[in-house]
Amino acid sequence: MNTFEDPLTRGSSNTSAPLGKAQGFYVIDTFNEYTLFHIFTANITEGDLKGTIDIFGQMREVDPVRYLTVVGGTGAFLGARGLASSTRVQIDRTPPAKWTLYFDLDLYY
């Protein structure tokens, strides 16, 4: 199990304008392939819409697009449900490994 607190930005570059932080944890949940079970909160503190978006689900590293479930939110995202589609932009496997992910959110209220 690993915990994380990573920056959220407006674009897919680490130098894009900041939005807040992603805070949560993940567990490697299989012995046969590199698969992670994620639970995290996107804590959005910058911009016109502020609040949190709660996301969880399983991500297989080999999948080009990974789909996670949006299970709730607070503030401007109160009661949000939907889908978080994730694609990997960059990976640095030098320990500790660092991933840059891009998320596309389809939210329903």
Image: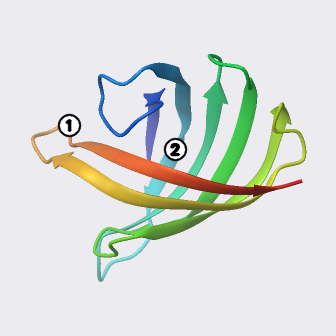
As shown in the figure, which amino acid type bears the numbered disc 2? Phe
Q: Mark 1 vs mark 2: which is more N-terminal?
A: 2
Is 2 placed above or below 56 here? above
Q: Quick one: SS at disc 1? A: loop
Q: Which residue is mark 2?
A: 25
Q: Which of 65 and 99 lies nearest the eye of the viewer?
A: 65
Q: How many numbered marks does the figure carry?
A: 2
The x and y percentages for residue 33 are 29, 78
Left or right placement of residue 75 versus residue 60 in this view: right
Is 86 placed above or below 43 here? below
- Contact between marks 1 and 2 (CB within 8 A): the answer is no
Q: Residue at x 27, y 51 (%)?
A: 89
The x and y percentages for residue 60 are 38, 72
The x and y percentages for residue 97 are 21, 43
Question: Could you say which disc has been placed on residue 29 in the image?
Answer: none
Q: Which residue is mark 1?
A: 96
